[in-house]
Image: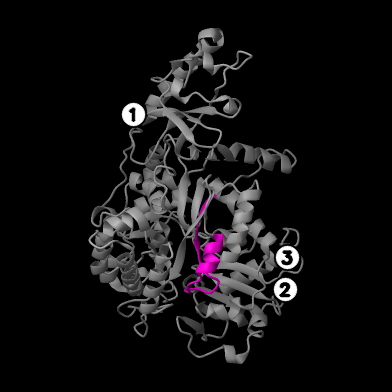
């Protein structure tokens, strides 16, 4: 059983920086009293030039964790005008005499130092999310946790009632502006939904409503939308998808969703910018400085490019995977038109997203053997194995990193086959495919959820990167074993610790937001405890973790959300760490991360509230400032509730 690599004692890292800040304060007093021979926090080699007089800055905190697993003691760092760390140091050991070049013509010190409270960790990344979809979710009906069809109807009614005053428009629910929502789960509702369940409510009758399942692999639509679909467009069988007909029409899964989405009046570019802005603001609140966007069309990537260069609200780093307008095709001309790597690290587009199968919750994951609770099916492949291999080879040969969505063990097998074939094409003869993969390609399997033991060994031998979401394990634990049976669950499903210790691969960790909440500390909690971060319990309401032999240590969990993501996008040493030359991204907490993880028998980790988030040396979230803004908006009333 893996356990967090911390104890109830905060450790030396917690106390040493507090002493260092005392030394820094003394140095500052000397500076004020003796300007001609003051102290500097910089060595001569890091003195800013004249152009950075007013923008180069040093920040000192109570403690700084420079990277996951590091024991380096630091409490200060300096950042350059272009938003990179230029020095990371311990003030008690690195206070140097300032030379003449460190003063401007008026005798003032060019190097501005700000002493701040709080405990710093590297900027956190989400290795797999969906940015526009999350922003749209923030502007739609939240159906997560809805326990009945009546609760769904109630939430939709309330959304429609408040839509106009919330800025969504008075025409929400019309043919031109469908009401949208996400989060329902037939396992929680107790039944598969249908259009009739929405139509039965007089307030919803005739409305155009499209509600995505929790995993976004099925969508539930109203009768008004069904009436738009010609009968000939409703075939009995849909390759790689399913039209649910019992207890009635209204739900479309995987490839069958195209029947509905082809009719949907999609948001325009300005509306999508609203979604992006809202999403970035919320993501910063939980300490995210960047994310891997797992599937964005070339059309939407043009919106990304324009906004990232021209909008001051674009404050989140984005590593985007291209998904062609039609899923699982080769569209090199459209991809090449949006491919880019911004020098400031705010937008990178160099990879593609392919899809092998559906999701476990809707029995859509493609399995080698039938489902234990539904022996009539083995799930659905969204594309056959030979086509997937052809696509992987074509995209790799065109110079793109290839990332394949695969959940079931058959889908993962085909994904490995495809990526191995692409590596054999791309790597020089006589070279190790694993070395070639690590150095040049970094092919990934998104989700890597259920993998046959034979194929786990192939991942090790090829160095394929698993991109996994710890909260999927804790969300699925209520039904995973019934779907898979105990043997498959124990040997194939939701691997984490064994990926690192047995397969010697560093996974990318993420959340898959909006499928799961984006809070990375909840993801770390799920990885370390294998319990639900919302309840602190297992599927049966107990306090034991689920298959805890696959739990990660705290350092391993933090690494997955920082250095692991960096390795999956070619930015090691630049993101997820606090070191010279890296992008100046950091997160401030009220206590060290290991202290939170030790609080309340390990429950403190899931309750963390971020204090500040910084991207490129720019503060993009401040908890206290947000409280003040809310208080001011409420007329200065005291006791304004705050849920950050």
| Stretch of the chain drawn in magenta | 317-338
Instruction: Give SS at disc 1.
Output: helix
Q: Which mark is residue 176?
A: 2
Residue 609, placed above or below residue 179:
above
Between the C-alphas of marks 3 and 2, the distance is 18 Å
Assess whether residue 335 is covered by the magenta stretch: yes
Please tell me which residue is depicted at 77% across the width and 66% down the height of the picture: 170
In the picture of the structure, the residue carrying the numbered disc 3 is: 161
In the picture of the structure, the residue carrying the numbered disc 1 is: 12
Instruction: Give SS at disc 3.
Output: helix
Please tell me which residue is depicted at 63% across the width and 66% down the height of the picture: 155
Between the C-alphas of marks 2 and 1, the distance is 61 Å
Please tell me which residue is depicted at 39% across the width and 74% down the height of the picture: 390
Instruction: Please tell me which residue lies in front, 321 or 89.
Output: 321
Between the C-alphas of marks 1 and 3, the distance is 55 Å
Label whose residue precedes the other's in the sequence (3 or 2): 3
């Amino acid at each position: 059983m893996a356990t967090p690599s911390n104890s109830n004692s905060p450790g030396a890292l917690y106390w040493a920086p507090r002493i260092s800040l005392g030394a820094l304060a003394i140095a500052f007093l000397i500076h004020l009293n003796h300007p001609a021979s003051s102290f500097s926090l910089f060595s001569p080699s890091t003195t800013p030039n004249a152009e950075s007089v007013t923008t180069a800055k040093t920040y000192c905190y109570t403690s700084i964790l420079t990277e996951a697993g590091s024991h380096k003691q630091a409490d200060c760092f300096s950042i350059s005008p272009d938003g990179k760390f230029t020095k990371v140091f311990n003030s008690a050991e690195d206070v140097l005499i300032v030379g003449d070049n460190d003063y401007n013509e008026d005798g003032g010190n060019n190097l501005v130092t700000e002493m701040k409270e709080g405990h710093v960790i590297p900027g956190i990344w989400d290795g797999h999310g969906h940015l526009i979809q999350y922003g749209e979710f923030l502007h739609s009906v939240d159906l997560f946790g809805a326990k009945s069809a009546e609760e769904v109807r109630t939430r939709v009614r309330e959304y429609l009632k408040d839509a106009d005053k919330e800025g969504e428009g008075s025409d929400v629910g019309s043919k031109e502006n469908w009401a949208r929502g996400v989060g329902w789960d037939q396992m929680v509702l107790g039944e598969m939904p249908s259009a009739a369940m929405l139509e039965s409510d007089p307030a919803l009758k005739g409305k155009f409503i499209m509600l995505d399942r929790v995993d976004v692999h099925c969508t539930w639509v109203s009768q008004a939308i069904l009436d738009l679909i010609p009968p000939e467009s409703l075939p009995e069988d849909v390759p790689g998808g399913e039209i649910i007909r019992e207890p009635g029409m209204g739900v479309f899964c995987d490839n069958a969703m195209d029947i509905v989405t082809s009719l949907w009046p999609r948001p325009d570019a300005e509306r999508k910018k609203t979604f992006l802005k809202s999403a970035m603001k919320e993501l910063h609140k939980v300490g995210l400085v960047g994310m891997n966007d797992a599937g964005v069309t070339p059309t939407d990537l043009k919106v990304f490019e324009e906004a990232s260069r021209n909008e001051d609200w674009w404050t989140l780093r984005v590593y985007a995977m291209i998904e062609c307008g039609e899923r699982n095709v080769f569209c090199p001309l459209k991809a090449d038109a949006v491919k880019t790597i911004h020098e400031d690290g705010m937008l990178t587009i160099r990879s593609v997203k392919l899809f092998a199968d559906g999701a476990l919750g809707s029995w859509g994951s493609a399995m080698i053997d039938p489902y234990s609770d539904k022996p009539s099916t083995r799930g659905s492949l969204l594309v056959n194995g030979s086509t997937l291999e052809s696509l992987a080879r074509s995209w790799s040969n065109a110079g793109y990193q290839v990332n394949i969505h695969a959940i079931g063990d058959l889908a993962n097998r085909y994904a490995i086959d495809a990526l191995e074939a692409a590596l054999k094409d791309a790597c020089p003869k006589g070279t190790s495919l694993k070395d070639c993969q690590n150095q040049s390609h970094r092919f990934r399997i998104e989700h890597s959820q259920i993998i046959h033991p034979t194929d786990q060994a192939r991942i090790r031998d090829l160095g394929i990167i698993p991109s996994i979401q710890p909260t999927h394990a804790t969300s699925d634990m209520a039904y995973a074993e019934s779907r898979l049976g105990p043997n498959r669950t124990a040997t194939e499903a939701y691997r984490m610790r064994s990926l690192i210790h047995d397969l010697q691969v560093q996974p990318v960790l993420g959340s898959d937001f909006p499928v799961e909440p984006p809070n990375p500390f909840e993801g770390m909690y799920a990885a370390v405890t294998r319990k639900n971060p919302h309840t602190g319990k297992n599927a049966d309401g107990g306090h034991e973790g689920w298959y805890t032999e696959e739990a990660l240590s705290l350092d391993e969990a933090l690494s997955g959300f920082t250095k692991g993501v960096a390795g999956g996008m070619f930015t090691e040493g630049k993101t997820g760490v606090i070191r010279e030359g890296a992008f100046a991204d950091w997160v401030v907490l009220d206590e060290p991360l290991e202290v939170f993880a030790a609080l309340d028998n390990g429950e403190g980790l899931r309750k963390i509230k971020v204090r500040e988030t910084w991207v490129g040396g720019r503060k993009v979230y401040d908890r206290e400032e947000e409280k003040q803004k809310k208080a001011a908006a409420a007329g200065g009333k005291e006791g304004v509730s705050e849920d950050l």
